[in-house]
């Protein structure tokens, strides 16, 4: 089935990325610390840490695989009971489970409807696809959910286009798998132009920040966060990332300006107050 193929590809990419990152960690550790004495006393700890990280990756992949297998098995069990139902009926049933926050059963019912090739021409097929993807997201079956959200983007389903890209960005942040994220955001920009929700742009900018490793990339991060206007609820958070990025570039004057921007605006909720305190602490470190 399509979901199985997509899941296996996503899982392969997920493991590849994490193993590559861990390999770089070991290489840099050995490169920086050439001393034989150091290697003898500390390299075992490094390898132990890498093995622990690989165990975590394996557990995450196994959890994803178990979830999608469970949904597939339940789908097979339920298929006989639902095979006579029209797509619209299954969609309505899945939406009912969804509204009741029973996302697992929603995914099972909608999986049946969406995976049937004869239903792809139904005008409501994209809506069923969206509810399936969102149900999988809510059950933390992220990689399979991402495949369906991307199918929605391919269908150019404008009603939930921003929601789909937002979820893909969230999945990238939660899994650390950024494969294809730039293309997803670019396709949304092509359709919507500059009218993109601030929450999407903020979280995508965070991905750029996490990936940045050179001067050009850091400047791109600053440019991305800077598009968030001072009227946005994400402005203060964006300014904090801008300040931190300028520190990485050793541009302390602009870093100070960014942190002062946070202090100068009225922030009332607890998270914002904490952010303002962090800005004060950052300024204190820069000045002293």
Image: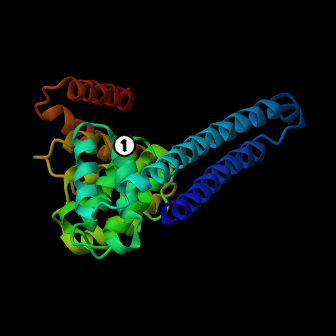
Residue in front for this viewpoint, 249 or 58: 58
* Viewer can see residue 251: no
Disc 1 crowd rating (10 Å Cα; few below 14, some 14-19, many 20+) is some
Q: Quadrant of residue 195?
A: bottom left
**Eyeballing the image, is 6 above or below 51?**
below
Residue in front for this viewpoint, 261 or 134: 134
Q: Residue at x 21, y 41 (%)?
A: 99
**In the displayed structure image, the side of residue 270 where residue 138 appears, left or right:** right
**Eyeballing the image, is 160 above or below 155?**
above
**In the displayed structure image, the side of residue 27 where residue 172 appears, left or right:** left
Q: Residue at x 20, y 36 (%)?
A: 262
Number of numbered discs on residues: 1
Query: How far across and down, in percent of the image, does residue 196 sit?
Result: 20, 60
| Colour scheme shown | rainbow
Query: How far across and down, in percent of the image, does residue 39 sit?
Result: 84, 36
**In the displayed structure image, the side of residue 223 where residue 41 appears, left or right:** right
Query: How far across and down, in percent of the image, does residue 280 sit?
Result: 28, 26
Q: Name the image quarter holding the C terminus.
A: top left
Query: How far across and down, in percent of the image, does residue 62 sit?
Result: 61, 43
> Which residue is labeled 1 in the image?
105
Q: Residue at x 46, y 55 (%)?
A: 144
Residue in front for this viewpoint, 270 or 89: 89
Residue in front for this viewpoint, 7 or 121: 121
* Viewer can see residue 39: yes
**Dot 1 lies on which element?**
helix
Q: Residue at x 36, y 43 (%)?
A: 105
């Amino acid at each position: 089935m399509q979901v199985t193929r997509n899941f296996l590809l996503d899982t392969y990419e997920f493991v590849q990325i994490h193993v590559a990152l861990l390999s770089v960690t070991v290489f840099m550790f050995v490169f920086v610390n050439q001393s034989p004495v150091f290697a003898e006393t500390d390299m075992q700890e490094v390898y132990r840490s890498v093995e622990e990280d690989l165990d975590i990756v394996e557990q995450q992949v196994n959890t994803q695989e178990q979830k999608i297998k469970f949904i597939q098995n339940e789908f097979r069990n339920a298929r006989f009971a639902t095979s006579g139902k029209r797509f619209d009926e299954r969609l309505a049933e899945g939406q009912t489970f969804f509204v009741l926050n029973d996302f697992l059963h929603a995914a099972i019912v909608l999986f049946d409807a969406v995976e049937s090739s004869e239903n792809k021409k139904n005008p409501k097929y994209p809506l069923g696809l969206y509810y399936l993807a969102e149900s999988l997201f809510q059950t933390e079956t992220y990689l399979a959910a991402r495949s369906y959200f991307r199918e929605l983007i391919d269908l150019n389903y404008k009603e939930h286009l921003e929601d789909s890209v937002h979820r893909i960005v969230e999945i990238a942040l939660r899994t650390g798998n950024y494969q294809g994220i730039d293309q997803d955001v670019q396709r949304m920009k092509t359709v919507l132009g500059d009218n993109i929700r601030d929450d999407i742009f903020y979280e995508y900018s965070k991905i750029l920040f996490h990936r940045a490793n050179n001067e050009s990339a850091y400047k791109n991060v600053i440019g991305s966060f800077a598009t968030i206007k001072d009227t946005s609820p994400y402005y203060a958070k964006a300014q904090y990332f801008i300040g931190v990025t300028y520190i990485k570039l050793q541009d302390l004057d602009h870093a100070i300006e960014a942190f002062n921007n946070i202090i100068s605006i009225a922030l009332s909720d607890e998270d914002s107050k904490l952010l303002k305190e962090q800005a004060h602490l950052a300024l204190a470190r820069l000045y002293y």
